[in-house]
């Protein structure tokens, strides 16, 4: 879920005779919990469906915030009041928020991912999935990839890889008419690039290279695919192959900072490698005390 929440405002305290800021605000706010523990004021209406309980949620630390999000739609901007039970409780959050404090948040819901629909579709047999139009398959594959991206951003690389593979299986399995095949290939390319990156993060460069090369079958000039393959070959100490990939990537994006830095890293690694090789050869063929080269009978 993408969204933003401004820092909480502390509303315990009275700045008008007989009425606190909480009391003034609460008079025009909607009670969404039934006990006036979470109150809501819509600043800008959203569109589409409400957030579902299965949606992926980023950085939700307060019970009240989670309940508030479940009342929102995409693009909505709202103000919430959370009583202590739904916020920081009897402990507060020192030094900024005292114990037993009612807090104010403004939350903007940019987007959210609902994986329930995708999970249901993936649970169907191949025959059942084939009954759906291509657009449905592409939508589910996109959701799987985006959910993988969400997990990737949390450094959950293995879980992200699982989601990417689910998307790839759906796309590989679906036969599209020639006039729509380019849509499938474009979706595959994104998933393959993400899989290559995930395997690099999992320290499995051979698999990263495999998926990077599959991406290059779709788009042989794709700079990201060339870069991922170059990174993988560097980790595999295949220096010449790494250079070939990275030079091709640089040709596509000559001013790309990451590509140019990787080429510098490659040059350094290769220099160290050749130095070690020279030292090994020198030791192998250096004369012994009796004048014969090492290893000579």
Image: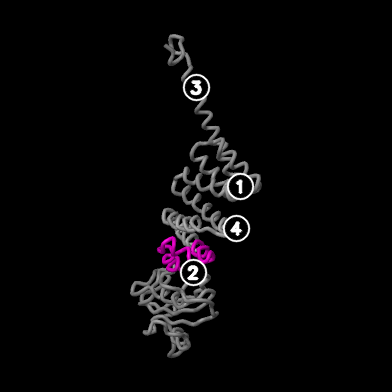
215 or 14, which is in the foreground? Answer: 215
Counting residues from the start of the chain, the first of labels 1 and 3 encountered is 1
Mark 1–mark 4 contact, CB under 8 Å?
A: no
Q: Nearer the viewer, mark 4 or mark 2?
A: 4
Tag on residue 178? 4
Query: Where does residue 261 sit, x and y in percent of width and height?
Result: 58, 44
User: Which quarter of the figure is the C terminus placed in?
Assistant: top left
Is 262 a magenta residue? Answer: no
What residue is pinned by disc 1?
A: 220
Few, some or many residues within 10 Å of mark 1 (<14, 14–19, 20+):
few
What residue is pinned by disc 2?
A: 112
State the SS at label 4: helix
Mark 1 vs mark 2, CA separation in Å? 33 Å
Residue 250 visible to an observer of this rendering: yes
68 or 234, which is in the foreground? Answer: 234
Q: Which residues are magenta?
A: 114-142
Counting residues from the start of the chain, the first of labels 2 and 3 encountered is 2
């Amino acid at each position: 879920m993408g969204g933003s929440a401004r820092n909480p405002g502390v509303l315990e305290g009275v700045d008008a005779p007989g009425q606190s800021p909480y009391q003034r605000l609460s008079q025009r706010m909607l009670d969404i919990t039934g006990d006036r523990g979470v109150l809501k004021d819509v600043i800008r209406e959203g569109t589409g469906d409400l957030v579902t309980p299965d949606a992926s949620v980023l950085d939700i630390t307060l019970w009240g915030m989670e309940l508030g999000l479940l009342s929102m739609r995409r693009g909505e901007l709202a103000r919430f009041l959370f009583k202590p039970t739904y916020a920081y409780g009897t402990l507060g959050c020192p030094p900024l928020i005292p114990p037993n404090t009612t807090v104010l948040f403004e939350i903007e819901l940019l987007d959210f991912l609902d994986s329930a629909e995708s999970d249901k579709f993936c649970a169907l047999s191949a025959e059942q999935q084939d009954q759906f139009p291509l657009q449905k398959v592409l939508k589910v594959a996109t959701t799987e990839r985006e959910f993988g991206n969400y997990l990737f951003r949390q450094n959950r690389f293995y879980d992200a890889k699982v989601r990417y593979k689910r998307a790839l299986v759906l796309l590989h399995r679906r036969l599209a008419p020639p006039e729509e095949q380019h849509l499938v290939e474009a979706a595959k390319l994104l998933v393959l690039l993400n899989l290559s990156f995930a395997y690099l993060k999992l320290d499995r460069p051979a698999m990263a290279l495999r998926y990077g090369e599959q991406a290059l079958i779709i788009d042989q000039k794709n700079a990201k695919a060339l870069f991922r393959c170059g990174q993988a070959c560097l980790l595999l100490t295949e220096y010449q192959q790494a250079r070939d990939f990275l030079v091709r990537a640089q040709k596509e994006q000559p001013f790309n900072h990451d590509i140019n830095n990787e080429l510098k890293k490659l040059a350094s690694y290769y220099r160290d490698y050749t130095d070690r090789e020279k030292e090994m050869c020198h030791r192998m063929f250096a004369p012994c005390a009796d004048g014969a080269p090492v290893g000579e009978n």
